[in-house]
Image: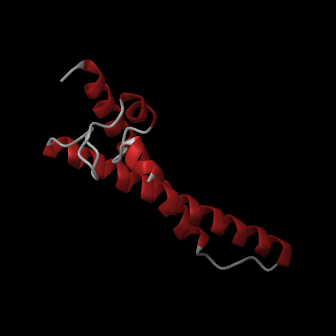
Amino acid sequence: MSGEPLDLIAHLNARRDELADRLARLDHEARRSSEPLVADFAEQAVQRENDDVVDRLRETTSAELREVTAALRRVAAGTFGKCMRCGSPIEAARLRAVPYSSLCMACLEK
């Protein structure tokens, strides 16, 4: 392997750890937000908006973590950097931009 794939793998590992940590913090925040609402109606509206934001952040963080984990599984299987649809190599620029990419640009555009 050349240096670039190793750099991408290191980046994926670091990103997985960062996302797992973020998800743990968001889960903690979600548990805390399940406390009873305050009596003030305006404050309740703010609390509910915050709960919605935390829920959306949890969803997007969890989805990205699944993508990164799947990419690391492809590394272990020896298929990292190959398009999951057509088997062609995924463009280096695409992997640098989105290291957990599973499709080449041609398949992505289909």
Q: Is the residue 105 above or below the residue 53 in the image?
A: above
Q: Is residue 20 left or right of residue 76?
A: right
Tally the marks. Answer: 0
**Relative image position of residue 102 (x, y in whole percent):** 33, 47
Q: Position of residue 97 (x, y in %)?
A: 46, 34
Residue 51 figure quarter: bottom right
Quadrant where the image shows the C terminus: bottom left
Residue 24 shows up from this direction: no
Residue 15: which quarter of the image? Answer: top left
Q: Is residue 30 above or below residue 65?
A: below
Can residue 14 be seen in the rendering of this structure?
yes
Residue 85 relative to residue 37: left or right: left
Q: Residue at x 34, y 38 (%)?
A: 12
What residue is at 30 percent from the left and 22 percent from the top?
A: 4
Q: Which residue ends up furthest to the left in the rendered image?
A: 77
Q: Nearer the viewer, residue 45 or 75?
A: 75
Vertical position of residue 63 compared to residue 7: above or below: below
